[in-house]
Image (tube, rainbow, N blue to C red):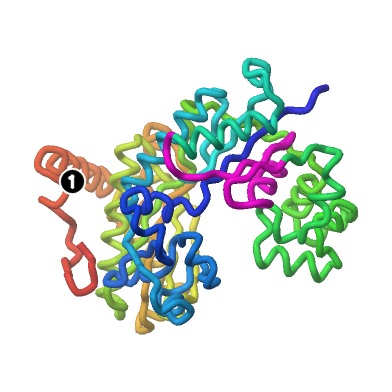
């Protein structure tokens, strides 16, 4: 069986490159794209090549970055513009294959196995051709990893940057892929890397040669999966660009303008988030069977807790109640909170579960009444705008809750 030809196309410093398209003068100075400091999102999201020379890191705070580079120019992100540029780049990819699967706003997998012959080029030549088109037509650069599977192609796009093509086929695994530290492999985060290191696994080659049964005993299913990927055993397909893939969860988070403290403020924050989640669930014709709450304190310590429900729900009131119970079970309400998140997962169709969970002692009748209330709110918002009506949580400009 002939190997597939998979490309992983990764835009270089994408947010920063987009800002340089908007403002070409930014190419001449060290520049970073940041979140909004006034809303306490003051971290580095991306940086241009000149800023990289100062070893500025993504996700560090603005003050840390400016300590390294006092003349650093910081610009706020323009996500709508980034999505438009991403759409245009993917339209170029579609000229080469319809098996184009965006993995994020700035990276896509392409399967050119059955279209390569149309262009009369080798895989490397075709990747170079795609890089040239994106650079000339859009004005940003991409790096392309070429391989026989997604995992190794992703590694290849990171191997050499910026504006480069790296080809790693099966015969190249021992000399390129296996020599790299295991942290360079997809899904090998800090905790996973530390766990593997404690087992004597430090390179991808070590992982490939390890006993898969031992890895499964020590790490569960993820251990065997990582072993398979290290050996190039990744047959995950590249999905068509226009294929609809259902969301597995619906969630929202909020970093508050000042820390929340006390049950009243925490409930207000959760209520606002639950309102957003419930509205999106109803708009998608879904209900959730699992609710998760996340909380982050001023030192960025994060705690998450979830509960599986007896019955599915898409109601703001019910999601708020469960989220608040979860929060109280894992967090002291008197402790300051920087960020809250509420997520509904385990999604089912709205017509798949007719009985709501009984949270309020009056049972099904109360749930049906709440459904009518929230359906009415949806109808009013659809006609007059989202801000015209809201639930009983307080509106507070100081915290950002609305």
Which region of the structure is painted magenta? 137-166
- Residue 321 position within the rendered picture, expressed as x and y whole percent measured from the top left: 33, 61
Q: In the rendered image, which quarter is residue 110 located in?
A: top right
Question: Quick one: 7 or 351, which is closer to the camera?
Answer: 7
On the rendered structure, is 93 left or right of 288?
right
Task: Name which residue lies at 79% across and 49% down.
Answer: 230
Residue 331 visible in this rendered orientation of the protein = no
Q: Which residue is mark 1?
A: 373
Q: Please tell me whether residue 382 is drawn above or below residue 73 in the rendered image.
A: above
Q: In the rendered view, does 262 fall on the left or right side of 102? A: left
Image quarter of the N terminus: top right
Q: Is residue 296 left or right of residue 206?
A: left
At mark 1, the secondary structure is helix
Residue 378 in the image: x percent, y percent? 19, 42
Q: Residue at position x 40%, y 35% from top?
A: 87
Q: Position of residue 364 (x, y in %)?
A: 31, 45
Query: Measured along the vertical axis of the image, is residue 213 above or below residue 103?
Result: below
Q: Quadrant of residue 185?
A: bottom right
Residue 153 belongs to the span the image colors magenta: yes
User: Where does residue 184 sit, x and y in percent of width and height?
Assistant: 70, 57
Query: Is residue 36 depicted above or below 365 in this figure?
Result: below
Counting the numbered discs, the total is 1
Badge 1: how crowded within 10 Å, few (<14), some, or many (20+)?
few
State the quadrant of the C terminus.
bottom left
Residue at (18% x, 57% y) in the render? 391
* Above or below for 12 versus 330: above
Q: Is residue 258 visible?
A: yes
- In the image shown, does 58 or 338 lie closer to the viewer? 58
Residue 248 is covered by the magenta coloring? no
Task: State the residue at coordinates (68%, 52%).
Answer: 159
Residue 55 lies in quadrant: bottom right
Give the farthest residue toward the bottom: 334
């Amino acid at each position: 069986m002939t190997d597939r030809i998979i490309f992983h196309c990764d835009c270089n410093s994408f947010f920063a490159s987009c800002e340089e398209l908007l403002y070409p003068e930014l190419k001449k100075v060290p520049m970073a794209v940041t979140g909004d400091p006034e809303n306490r999102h003051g971290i580095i999201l991306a940086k241009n090549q000149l800023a990289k020379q100062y070893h500025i890191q993504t996700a560090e705070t603005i003050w840390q970055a400016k300590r390294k580079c006092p003349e650093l120019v910081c610009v706020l992100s323009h996500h709508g513009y980034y999505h438009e540029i991403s759409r245009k780049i993917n339209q170029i990819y579609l000229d080469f294959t319809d098996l184009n699967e965006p993995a994020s706003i700035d990276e896509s997998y392409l399967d050119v196995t059955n279209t390569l012959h149309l262009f009369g080029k080798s895989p490397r030549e075709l990747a170079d051709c795609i890089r040239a088109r994106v650079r000339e037509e859009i004005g940003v650069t991409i790096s392309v990893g070429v391989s026989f599977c997604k995992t190794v192609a992703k590694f290849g796009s990171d191997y050499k940057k910026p504006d480069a093509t790296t080809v790693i086929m099966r015969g190249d695994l021992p000399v390129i892929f296996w020599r790299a530290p295991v942290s360079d492999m997809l899904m090998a985060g800090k905790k996973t890397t530390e766990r593997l290191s404690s087992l004597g696994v430090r390179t991808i080659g070590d992982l490939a040669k390890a006993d898969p049964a031992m890895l499964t005993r020590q790490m569960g299913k993820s251990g065997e999966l990582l072993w398979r990927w290290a050996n190039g055993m990744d047959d995950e397909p590249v999905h068509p660009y226009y294929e609809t893939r259902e969301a597995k969860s619906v969630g929202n988070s909020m970093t508050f303008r000042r820390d929340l403290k006390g049950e009243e403020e925490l409930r207000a924050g959760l209520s606002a988030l639950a309102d957003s989640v419930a509205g999106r669930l109803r708009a998608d014709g879904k209900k959730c069977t699992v609710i998760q709450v996340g909380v982050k304190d001023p030192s960025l310590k994060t705690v998450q807790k979830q509960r599986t429900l007896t019955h599915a729900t898409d109601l703001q009131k019910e999601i708020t109640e469960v989220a608040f119970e979860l929060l109280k079970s894992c967090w002291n309400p008197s402790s300051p909170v920087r960020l809250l998140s509420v997520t509904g997962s385990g999604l089912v169709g709205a017509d798949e579960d007719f009985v709501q969970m009984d949270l309020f002692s009056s049972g099904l009748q109360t749930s049906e009444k709440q459904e009518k209330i929230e359906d009415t709110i949806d109808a009013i918002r659809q006609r007059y705008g989202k801000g015209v009506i809201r639930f009983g949580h307080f509106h507070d400009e100081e915290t950002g809750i609305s």
